[in-house]
Image (cartoon, rainbow, N blue to C red):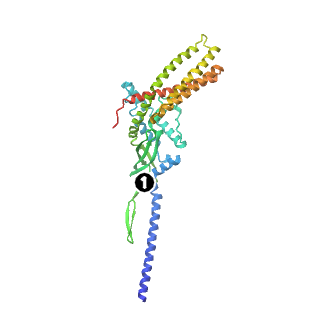
Amino acid sequence: MDDYTWRMRLEARRRRRRQERLFALVFFGVILFGMFLYNSVYTKTPEYAMREMVDAYRAGDAETFRRHVDLNSITLKAYDDLTSDLFKYDEQLTDRERSLFENFYVLIRRQMCSGAVKVLNTYIDTRQWTLPGEILKGRQLGIDYDLLLDRSLIRHTSLIDLEGVEHTGDEATATFSVVEEYSQVPFVLKVTLKDLANESFNVGGSEFEIFGRKFKLPGFTFNMGGSDWKVVTVDNYRGYLDAVSPLLRKNLAEYIDATEEIVYRYNRTFAAAQDAFISLQRSPYGILTESQRAETSGYITNTIIPALEDRQAELDAVEVPQGAQFLAELRRESTRVTILAWQSYVKGITENSATDLDTAASLHKQELALDQRIEEIIHNSAVAKNLPELP
């Protein structure tokens, strides 16, 4: 090999090494820039916020979840969607009564939404559904909050996954696949997100070529002041209710029809038992004699309680559609509390125990509240038969 050829090959080798070093430098530069974009840009995007929210929900990370969800804003619009036709199809109401009820629900909107936020926050922290208590406990506002929560579907809706995110300026929309657990109806919820950080600049997508290899950098919007992407509304919540509620109403109506004869037959039995019980309680001095106490105790133990147990056994033998589980469980709870009330009453009169009589009275109040809730569900089911069929 002559000297000229050797020098040319040596120069070519040096040139190739310089190109390889430059390529490696550019390659690692692109990687570092990508890491910068991820840490400084992508983590500020609504896509990242929603992924982080979903992961936090599944992991039970309440703090991170709350950072991306504005529960106060969400519940206000959801409440309007939920109550918009609450009394619309109840033919037992006059126009004036319907208007009064609708205005009443508007007046208590703040308290109701505050209670919903408390319920949701408790669930996020403990994974337990509990009622808010305070002013919404029982019927202090004249409504059954537990029934309203059941109507909202919130307690039996499961999150499947994030479907996608569309980003436009300081607002974005995200879609989530969910399923209603009773009916197994799948649905795609659409939510609106807003970013509280306003200072931003755009990094436009660009393409370049090095040594015949093409590279492309994606475009991003970078928030200089940070970002605070939060879900503020569920845009198609009303559509979700309309998609699921008809099937649940159908399940409920089927269960009510299937148990109607059992309920009617035992209502007659209990009406006769009530007359007999009142007769046993009659006393000219308002104080039961020893024989009255013994006879009353025997009647409750041998007649009333067994009738309650038999009724519940017949109800339990009826197949319960998924959409009627709530009513079936309320009936079981009503039976349980009623039996406990009678047992406490028996102990109170046989042992002359004021404590047990007070317990019986307290349990009786719980029973009345449960029975009122059951009657409201049955009434609402009858009203639902007037609802128009959705296409």
Q: Is residue 135 left or right of residue 382?
A: right
Q: Write the residue at 42% across / 80% down.
A: 12
Screen quadrant of the N terminus = bottom left
Spot occupied by residue 43 in the image (x, y as percentages of width and height): 46, 55
Q: Compare residues 262 and 99 and report the one nearer the observer.
A: 262
- Which residue is farthest bottom? 2
Question: Can you see residue 384?
Answer: yes
Q: How many marks?
A: 1
Instruction: Inspect this view and state whether residue 110 appears.
Output: no
Helix, strand or loop for disc 1: loop
Amino acid type of disc 1? Glu
Residue drawn at point x = 47 percent, y = 39 percent = 156
Which residue is drawn at the image coordinates 49% and 21% (left, top)? Answer: 267
In front here: 12 or 156?
156
Residue 317's place in the image compared with 1, above or below, is above
Q: Which quarter of the rendered picture does the C terminus lie within?
A: top left
Label 1 crowd (10 A; few <14 / some 14-19 / many >=20): few
* Picture quadrant where residue 19 is located: bottom left
Provide residue 264's location: percent of width, then percent of height.
46, 23
Question: Where does the image place residue 152, in percent across and percent down from the top left?
Answer: 44, 37
Q: Residue at label 1?
A: 199
Find residue 50 and report its horizontal and vertical position in percent: 45, 50
Residue 29 position by quadrant: bottom left
